[in-house]
Image (cartoon, helix red, strand yellow):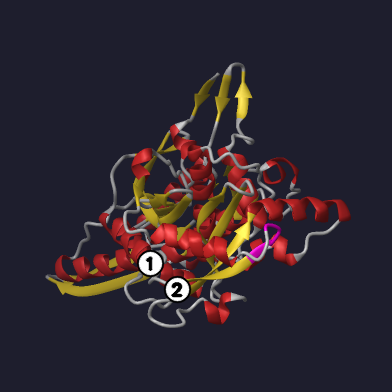
């Protein structure tokens, strides 16, 4: 069968669209609490989780009508760092960290990532299978964009009155369609993506601020530049209409491997942007970027960990990226491990993800008056605004490098030696060499 991967749905996009200047629209990842910190300069503790035993216990708990927290939350793991293959017990053993500052991982998110990688959610039409990476988007109706254009023209023709701003806000607040790609909509996985998307709109348009130095909203950056230009020359180079899309995308992934062990060295989440325009009844990309929007995207990417510290929702988003990376690696490597429970039998908790969300709006205003011959001149600037995720991780041979230091083999030995029995669900182990996992 042919497998078609549409380009637009291949990536997992966290979108925010922004129309700036006189009109702006935004559309738009316990137990080691003490032990997780190095006990000295050359040791650190980590946690291992047996997927074979985990699946066995999940199947048993499902038949008994409940899932204990230690199973539902992946035995307390907050960061997946990689896996070890234990051929003696036909087991894939996850290893990672338990960081009290991060939310616990959900086992069903791992199940969703595996099902996506194994094409369980792909759709077949005739002889073609259509696959999409996990993703989401919150999209306004193109007709709303056109109405905002008309409202902007009205504001350009005279004073920006409260009624005009109210009309702008009313139009912006109309429901926007929530789309989920590649996975079921009513899942925790989807909710994390949508919530992260929705909050991103607030950061982009300045209606929310995290108080982080160097992370300024696009709306505020635009207003600052426009004010400076107006004070210097009486006019601004800011276009009357500029619409930007923002989405979260995988940065450069890097994996280390040795015999039977793979470590996710790097799995960063970065923010990308592109200028868009309204063509008839469709919003399409232009292949160009707004320099200010690009500055915001770079600042967010650089500050991602600080943002996540303030809003742990973005740690959860990063966790989804790592789950997708792990699933894609396992599929690429053909690990030969039985994932039947996670792939087919684990029930997913029905999570409320609304089909629509209200658009968001924010506004900035600036007025400057100065004397000119025979009178005075006034310039008024109004910047109202209103409101995807992209984990399109591709695993190829070039994504891996062979660890030639022996570190991964020592990690594997430490992990397997610390296991009390072949039926242990999870356990902690100590690395005797310096270990600095990707943050």
State the count of labels: 2
Q: Tell me, for residue 217, which label it has, or none.
A: 1
How far across and how far down the image is residue 17, in percent?
Answer: 43, 52
Q: Residue at x 58, y 46 (%)?
A: 87
Look at the picture and state if 415 lies above or below 339: below
Which region of the structure is painted magenta?
422-426
The answer to whether residue 439 is left or right of residue 195 is: left
How far across and how far down the image is residue 192, in percent?
Answer: 59, 58
Q: Are marks 1 and 2 in contact (CB under 8 Å)?
A: yes
Q: Looking at the rendering, which quadrant does residue 64 occupy?
A: bottom right
Look at the picture and state if 100 lies above or below 16: below
Q: Nearer the viewer, residue 302 or 346?
A: 346
Secondary structure predominantly adopted by residues drawn in magenta: loop
Q: CA distance from mark 1 to mark 2?
A: 8 Å
Instruction: Name the quadrant of the C terminus.
Output: bottom left
Q: Dot 2: few (<14), some (14–19), or many (≥20) neighbours within 10 Å?
A: few
Q: Dot 1: few (<14), some (14–19), or many (≥20) neighbours within 10 Å?
A: many
Q: Is residue 424 part of the magenta span, yes or no?
A: yes
Q: Looking at the rendering, which quadrant does residue 184 occupy?
A: top right
- Residue linked to disc 2: 209
Q: Is residue 196 part of the magenta span, yes or no?
A: no
Q: Secondary structure at mark 2?
A: loop
The answer to whether residue 299 is left or right of residue 351 is: left
How far across and how far down the image is residue 94, in percent?
Answer: 56, 57
**Which mark is first along the chain, 2 or 1?**
2
Instruction: Name the quadrant of the N terminus.
Output: top right
Q: Is residue 167 visible?
A: no
How far across and how far down the image is residue 367, in percent?
Answer: 31, 72
Q: Secondary structure at mark 1?
A: loop
């Amino acid at each position: 069968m042919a497998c078609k991967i549409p380009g637009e749905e291949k990536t997992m996009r966290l979108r925010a669209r922004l129309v700036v200047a006189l009109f702006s629209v935004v559309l738009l990842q316990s137990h080691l609490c003490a032990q997780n910190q190095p006990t000295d300069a050359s040791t650190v503790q980590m946690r291992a989780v047996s997927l074979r035993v985990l699946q066995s216990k999940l199947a048993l708990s499902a038949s008994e009508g409940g899932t204990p927290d230690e199973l539902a939350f992946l035995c307390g793991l907050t960061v997946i760092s990689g896996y070890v293959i234990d051929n003696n017990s036909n087991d894939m053993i996850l290893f990672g960290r338990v960081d009290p500052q991060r939310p616990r991982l959900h086992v069903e998110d791992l199940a969703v990532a595996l099902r996506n990688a194994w094409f369980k959610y792909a759709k077949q039409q005739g002889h073609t299978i259509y696959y999409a990476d996990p993703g989401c988007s919150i999209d306004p109706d193109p007709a709303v964009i056109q109405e905002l254009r008309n409202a902007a023209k009205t504001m350009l023709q005279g004073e920006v009155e409260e009624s005009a701003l109210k009309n702008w806000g009313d139009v912006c607040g109309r429901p926007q369609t929530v789309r989920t790609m590649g996975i079921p909509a009513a899942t925790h996985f989807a909710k994390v993506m949508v919530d992260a998307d929705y909050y991103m709109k607030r950061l982009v348009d300045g209606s929310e601020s995290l108080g982080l130095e160097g992370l300024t909203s696009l709306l505020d950056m635009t207003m600052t530049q426009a004010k400076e230009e107006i004070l210097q020359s009486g006019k601004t180079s800011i276009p009357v209409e500029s619409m930007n899309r923002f989405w979260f995308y995988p940065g450069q992934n890097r994996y280390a491997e040795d015999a039977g062990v793979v470590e996710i060295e790097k799995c960063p989440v970065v923010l990308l942007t592109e200028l868009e325009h309204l063509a008839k009844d469709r919003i399409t990309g232009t292949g160009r970027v707004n320099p200010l929007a690009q500055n915001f995207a770079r600042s967010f990417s650089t500050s991602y960990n600080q943002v996540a510290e303030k809003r742990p929702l973005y740690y959860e988003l990063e966790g989804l990226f790592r789950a997708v990376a792990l699933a894609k690696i396992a599929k690429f490597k053909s690990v030969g491990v039985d994932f039947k429970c996670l792939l087919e039998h684990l029930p997913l908790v029905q999570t409320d993800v609304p089909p629509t969300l209200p658009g968001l709006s924010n506004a900035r205003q600036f007025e400057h008056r100065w004397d000119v011959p025979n009178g005075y001149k006034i310039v008024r600037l109004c910047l109202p605004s209103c409101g995807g995720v992209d984990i399109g991780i591709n695993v190829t041979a070039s994504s891996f490098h062979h660890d030639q230091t022996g570190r991964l083999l020592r990690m594997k030995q430490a992990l397997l030696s610390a296991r009390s029995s072949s039926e242990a669900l999870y356990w902690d182990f100590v690395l005797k060499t310096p270990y600095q996992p990707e943050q």
